[in-house]
Image (spheres, rainbow, N blue to C red):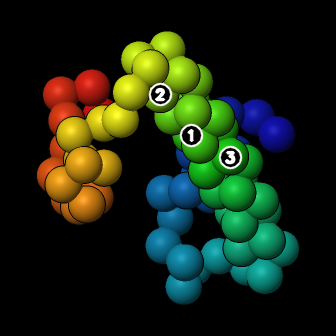
Amino acid sequence: MKTIEIEKLLKTPVKELKYHELQQRKKILKVAIKMIDEALTKRKEERGGVFPSEILGSELTLSKDE
């Protein structure tokens, strides 16, 4: 899928998307979440520790690296 098509799917309000476009958006977001999880895991391994936000138990409190 081209970048322009992905950008359109992500920027268009959900109410304006057709069923198949919603399915595509869902797939794109699932892949993006997987990539983010992998990047976070890699960063944790590189850092060799726990992020301050995990120590505080709050996802809203971000460390400088996040």
Q: Which residue is denoted by mark 1 in the rendering?
A: 36
Residue at x-position 52% and y-position 64%: 12
Residue 10 falls left or right of residue 49: right
From the viewer's perspective, is the residue at label 2 or at label 3 nearer?
2
| Disc nearer the start of the sequence (2/3) | 3
Local crowd size for mark 3, using a 10 Å CA cut-off: few (<14), some (14–19), many (≥20): few
Front residue (pair 31, 57): 57
Residue 33 falls left or right of residue 60: right
Residue at x-position 55% and y-position 78%: 14
Residue at x-position 47% and y-position 28%: 44
Q: CA distance from mark 3 to mark 1?
A: 5 Å
Q: Which residue is denoted by mark 3 in the rendering?
A: 34
- Is 37 rendered above or below residue 20? above
Q: Secondary structure at mark 2?
A: helix
Three-letter code for the amino acid on which mark 2 is drawn: Lys
From the viewer's perspective, is the residue at label 2 or at label 1 nearer?
2
Q: Secondary structure at mark 1?
A: helix
Q: Which residue is denoted by mark 2 in the rendering?
A: 44
Q: Are marks 3 and 1 in contact (CB under 8 Å)?
A: yes
Which quadrant would residue 30 be assigned to in this image?
bottom right
Can you give x and y, in whole percent of width and height, for residue 24 in the image? 78, 62
Local crowd size for mark 1, using a 10 Å CA cut-off: few (<14), some (14–19), many (≥20): few
